[in-house]
Image (spheres, rainbow, N blue to C red):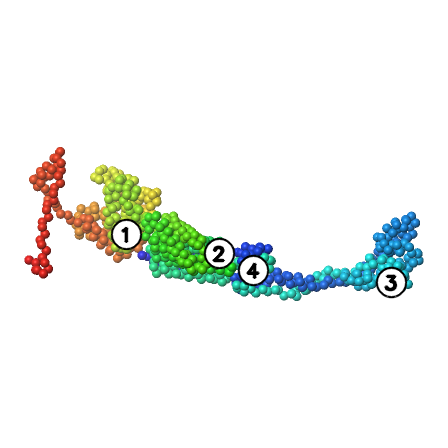
């Protein structure tokens, strides 16, 4: 068993750690879906300690400070002149109406109502001209004096009320009221707002307000059930990471640490307990991807179904046992158990690290220990049931057992729940059934695909291919019986040697069955199929004969690919010949032309790349040499075995495989022992006497019914002596 090199183990660990970081990284954080005005049906608490500047509260405080600043007022001299001009126009109108002879009293009164009250109009029309002029002068003086003062926008009414106090005492009460009536409407604020100064003052007030900081403690109640969400609450929910979850450096560090731990554990396992089928870097890197992909899928799945309490049982619907079950059926059960437990631990970590699973206390978080126990037990049951599976129905049975184990774990937790509900049993049974059966189906469905990706030839495949009634072997037996018989003998010879040398004996046997598959295309061109008939090579050019002989390698590969033989079985077809010389026809060609190139008479190769194909090369050559030898004495058999192995070593055909000298010695001894049994000396049976021949012929006369010859009676065995008496 070849272990991975230290650089390969380190690279595997690095790739696995990187893949797990990607799988566990919170790319899809789930956010709380709330809008302003919504009414929350449950309490929401803070997931973490958080101190932040509240933009809303700070803006509100600054607006309050700005609104507290009064308007900046300045005296406007244009107000007095404008209002005095208006007064002059009004006084002129009154004088004109008073002097209008073409108007009656009612018409005059109507004209004056635009500037005077009804009583003021009556007074103005009834008084003498001298008194009117006195009233007009008094009104103008009162207006000028009033508008010369600073009148604020809210002080105009007070200024109007003070007009009567400014009227001369020489006027009668009616005349004084007329003065007030003429001026009252024209008294307006003389102080106006300075917009620029006011804005500057309010900006200064805003700047003087410090930012409002809020401190939120972990577990602090943010929203009470039944509360309506406002803008301030939305800001708080966002800042604590419930609306737009942010990736914290601590989250990233935790993911990296967890991924590194899992990668180190699995890489250490492969270093300490090497798996033969993972002896190449591409395969272990593919294993890293196979381990990480389910974690990524589970991570996304959990983020969708959790932490809603009404859907908590959906967390157990994942067919997580599928990957360990595949590993058990394709590679090794111990490795599958390690991978399954590590994946269950990663599932537990995923639940813990989800942004809002264990953070919103009102939503009952899923028990992370339950995740590990349920998935861990389900995986272990599936692995133990599937690691020796040879038929498709065994995968389904393994899935059922995995589901039963998961259901048992869920039921145990249900019994411990003080608030258990009977309907939960339906969800538990559904989750366990879906997870278990889908794991079995995925294992059965993905078995061939994953085996092909890993380049693993499974024992199930080899057992099927080793059946002598397999289609290709049946064709070989029918169309090339000599080749088929030769393959059976080579298989018997090579299988025992492979077993003793620590190679895959079953793979070697299957490889022997199919190594000469291409000879079914033109079977008569191979000596073992001619059965004493005409040899088609007689009279042919040696080069053409060599091409036909070498063609069986290409034809065999085409047949193997057409019938989807595993790659490791296909390798036996070209590698059992390697790049050896087709020596018989090369010698014939050399006799005709001494300058004949050897390259025209060599098999295309490649040389044996594995111990198994090398053993088949040695067995094939050894069996052919011994069978063609006239001297098959024990000494000669031993000599031929040694010569064949030495010749292959000298030719360099074994340089690219990992057979050691000790392996070669073991193989040689196995070949010798097997061939001695095949070609052992036999007893020469005597010819029947003339009397025996006549008796035999007489028994088979036509029309005579054969009667079975009774077997001779067994001689009576001598009585066994008693132990107490000495034997005679």
First of labels 4, 2 by sequence position? 4
Q: CA distance from mark 2 to mark 1?
A: 55 Å
Q: Is residue 490 left or right of residue 157?
A: left
Quadrant (top left/top right/bottom left/bottom right) for the N terminus: bottom left
Q: Residue 77 appears in which quarter of the rendering?
A: bottom right
Q: CA distance from mark 3 to mark 1?
A: 133 Å
Q: What residue did someone put label 2 on?
A: 309
Quadrant (top left/top right/bottom left/bottom right) for the C terminus: bottom left
Q: Residue at 23% of width from left, 37% of height from top?
A: 534
Of labels 1 and 4, the one closer to you: 4
Q: What residue did someone put label 4 on?
A: 223
Q: Residue furthest top?
A: 703
First of labels 3, 2 by sequence position? 3
Q: CA distance from mark 3 to mark 4?
A: 68 Å
Q: What residue did someone put label 3 on?
A: 167
Q: Is residue 294 visible to the viewer in this orientation of the structure?
A: no
Q: What residue did someone put label 1 on?
A: 505
First of labels 2, 1 by sequence position? 2
Q: CA distance from mark 3 to mark 2?
A: 85 Å
Q: Is residue 697 above or below residue 401?
A: above
Q: Residue at 19% of width from left, 47% of height from top?
A: 629
Q: Quick check: marks 2 and 1 in contact, CB under 8 Å?
A: no
Q: Is residue 674 left or right of residue 282?
A: left
């Amino acid at each position: 068993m070849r272990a991975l090199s230290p650089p390969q183990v380190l690279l595997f660990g690095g790739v696995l750690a990187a893949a797990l970081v990607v799988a566990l990284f919170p790319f899809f954080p789930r956010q709380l879906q709330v809008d302003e005005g919504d009414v929350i049906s449950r309490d929401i608490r803070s997931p973490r300690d958080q101190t932040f500047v509240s933009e809303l509260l700070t803006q509100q405080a600054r607006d309050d400070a700005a609104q507290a600043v009064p308007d900046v007022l300045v005296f406007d001299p244009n107000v007095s002149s404008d209002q005095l001009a208006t007064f002059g126009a009004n006084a002129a109108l009154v004088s004109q109406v008073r002097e209008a002879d073409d108007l009656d009293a009612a018409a005059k009164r109507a004209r004056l109502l635009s500037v005077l009250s009804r009583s003021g109009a009556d007074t103005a029309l009834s008084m003498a001209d001298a008194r009117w002029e006195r009233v007009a002068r008094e009104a103008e003086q009162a207006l000028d004096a009033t508008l010369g003062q600073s009148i604020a926008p809210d002080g105009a009414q007070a200024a109007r009320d003070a007009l009567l106090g400014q009227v001369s005492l020489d006027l009668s009460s009616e005349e004084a009221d007329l003065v007030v009536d003429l001026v009252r409407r024209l008294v307006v604020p003389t102080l106006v707002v300075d917009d620029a100064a006011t804005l500057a003052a309010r900006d200064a007030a805003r700047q003087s307000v410090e930012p409002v900081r809020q401190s939120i403690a972990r577990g602090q109640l943010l929203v009470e059930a039944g509360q309506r969400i406002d803008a301030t609450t939305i800001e708080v929910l966002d800042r604590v990471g419930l609306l737009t979850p942010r990736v914290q450096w601590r989250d990233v560090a935790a993911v990296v640490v967890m991924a590194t731990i899992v990668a180190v554990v699995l890489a250490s396992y492969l270093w300490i307990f090497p798996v033969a089928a993972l002896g190449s870097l591409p395969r272990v890197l593919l294993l890293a991807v196979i381990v990480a992909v389910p974690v990524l899928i589970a991570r996304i799945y959990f983020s969708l179904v959790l932490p809603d309490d009404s859907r908590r049982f959906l967390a157990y619907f994942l067919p997580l046992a599928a990957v360990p079950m595949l590993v058990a059926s394709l590679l090794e059960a111990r490795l599958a158990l390690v991978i399954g437990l590590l994946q269950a631990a990663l599932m537990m970590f995923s639940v813990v690290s989800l942004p809002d699973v264990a953070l919103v206390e009102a939503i009952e978080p899923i028990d992370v220990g339950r995740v590990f126990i349920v998935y861990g037990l389900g995986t272990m049951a599936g692995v133990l049931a599937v690691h020796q599976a040879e038929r498709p129905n065994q995968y389904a049975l393994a899935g059922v057992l995995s589901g039963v184990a998961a259901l048992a774990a869920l039921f145990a937790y249900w019994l411990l729940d003080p608030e258990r509900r009977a309907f939960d049993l339906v969800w538990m049974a559904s989750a366990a059934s879906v997870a278990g059966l889908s794991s079995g189906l995925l294992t059965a469905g993905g078995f061939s695909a994953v085996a092909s990706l890993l380049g693993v030839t499974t024992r199930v495949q080899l057992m099927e291919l080793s059946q002598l009634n397999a289609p290709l072997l049946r064709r070989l037996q029918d169309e090339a019986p000599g080749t088929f018989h030769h393959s059976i003998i080579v298989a018997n010879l090579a299988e025992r040697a492979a077993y003793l040398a620590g190679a895959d004996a079953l793979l070697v046997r299957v490889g022997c069955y199919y190594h000469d598959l291409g000879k079914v295309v033109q079977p008569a061109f191979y000596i073992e199929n001619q059965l004493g008939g005409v040899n088609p090579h007689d009279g042919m050019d040696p080069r053409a004969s060599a091409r036909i002989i070498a063609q069986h390698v290409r034809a065999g590969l085409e047949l193997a690919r057409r019938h989807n033989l595993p790659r490791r079985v296909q390798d036996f077809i070209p590698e059992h010949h390697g790049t050896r010389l087709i020596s018989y026809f090369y010698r014939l060609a050399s006799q005709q032309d001494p300058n004949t190139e050897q390259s025209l008479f060599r098999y295309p190769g490649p040389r044996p790349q594995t111990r198994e194909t090398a053993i088949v090369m040695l067995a094939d050559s050894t069996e052919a040499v011994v069978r063609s030898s006239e001297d098959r004495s024990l000494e000669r058999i031993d000599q031929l075995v040694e010569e064949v192995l030495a010749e292959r070593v000298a030719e360099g055909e074994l340089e690219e495989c990992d057979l050691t000298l000790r392996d070669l010695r073991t193989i040689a001894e196995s070949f010798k022992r097997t061939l001695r049994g095949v070609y052992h000396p036999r007893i020469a049976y005597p010819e029947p006497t003339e009397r025996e021949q006549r008796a035999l012929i007489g028994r088979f006369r036509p029309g005579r019914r054969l009667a079975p010859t009774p077997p001779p009676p067994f001689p009576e065995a001598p009585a066994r002596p008693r132990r107490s008496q000495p034997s005679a």
